[in-house]
Amino acid sequence: MAEAILNQPQFQDADKAREYLEALRWPNGPVCPHCGFLGKHLALKGAKYRPGLYKCADCYEQFTVTVGTVFERSKIALNVWLQAVHLMCASKKGVSAKQLERMLGVTYKTAWFIAHRIREAMESEGGGLLGGDGDIVEADETYWGKATDENDKPVATPRGGFRHKMMIVSLVERNGEKRSFHIPKANGATLSAVLKSQVSPQAHLMTDAAKYYRAVGKSFASHQWVDHGAKEYARGNVTTNTVEASFAILKSGLIGTFHSVSAKHLQRYCNEFDFSWNTRQSQGFSDSMRAEVALKGIGGKRLTYRRIGGESQANA
């Protein structure tokens, strides 16, 4: 099925890809990324102008559909970008940079940079507090890899438990959105900061029996928990099974596809799997619909190789 989809014109021809992206991002006509003016801009045509170049009728700046997006100033053909977006959106457990290198015919460095740019487009722009209508929000934490500092150097930590690992806390609105955060440590202060900034006071919070949820739980309409230590996993509708199911998909991708993800980049991988969860098939999304959502999120998210952690600009 994937091969048949990738035979479509926008995946095979750069001009068709540009036209597809223009229709998707500008359904009511071109919008200037410099001043935000929506109007009848001047289409610049002729041998000295590249295809798809416009001049703003208000601020007179020139622009294309990729200006101000994660695709800006890329030397990779736009149809190849669309292929990469579709491949990442169609892969439930993620697709590695090595796989993108082989499938797209680019260098590993470029494939790695492409993947991170697309993850940037997948990042949620918010949308209000979870549980705002008095809905149930499940919260739980999970652990990954080994703890490192800002330079990805191993941090000396006591042995035993999970103190030597990186920590992720996830919030899932029952039948709704998921948001995950890489946090320095799981304690009352860090979890309280995340929960209060992301969850409505009207929400009904459900967690496991960890004591660091008790104090912040009083900030919400109710706080109930299940005691996993006593082998209790559900009590009526009180459960954390939804958020734990989302962890299973995250871990299968981190372990089976990416193998090694450092603290520096873990948040972007969390964003990718949150995006996949929020646009999963059971929510009515197909692979193509999921890719369209990602493409609508490319604006205002320039990402340079230096910003990701490279030493110089990449040829992506």
Image (cartoon, grey):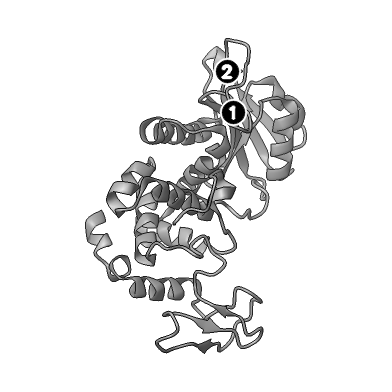
- Asked whether the viewer can see residue 3, the reply is yes
- The furthest residue to the top: 159
Name the kind of residue labelled 1 in the image: Met
- Asked whether the viewer can see residue 202, the reply is no
- In terms of image quadrants, where is residue 159? top right
Q: How many marks?
A: 2
Q: Residues within 10 Å of mark 1 (few under 14, many from 20)?
A: many
Residue 36 sits above or below residue 244 on the image: below
**Where is the N terminus found, in terms of image quarters?**
bottom left
Which residue is painted at 46% across and 35% down in the image?
A: 250
Mark 1 secondary-structure assignment: strand
Residue 234 sits above or below residue 292 on the image: above
Which residue is painted at 50% across and 69% down in the image?
A: 66
Marks 2 and 1: in contact by CB < 8 Å? yes
Image position, residue 56 (x, y; %): 59, 84
Which residue is painted at 48% across and 81% down in the image?
A: 53
Mark 2 secondary-structure assignment: loop
Gap between marks 1 and 2 measured at Cα: 9 Å
Q: Residues within 10 Å of mark 2 (few under 14, many from 20)?
A: some
Q: Which mark is residue 162?
A: 2
- The furthest residue to the front: 312
Image position, residue 167 (x, y; %): 59, 28
Q: Nearer the viewer, residue 287 or 84?
A: 84
Q: Which mark is residue 110?
A: none
Q: Which mark is residue 167?
A: 1
Residue 251 sits above or below residue 279 on the image: above
Name the kind of residue labelled 2 in the image: Phe
Image position, residue 133 (x, y; %): 66, 50
Q: Nearer the viewer, residue 187 or 110?
A: 110
Which residue is painted at 61% across and 21% down in the image?
A: 155
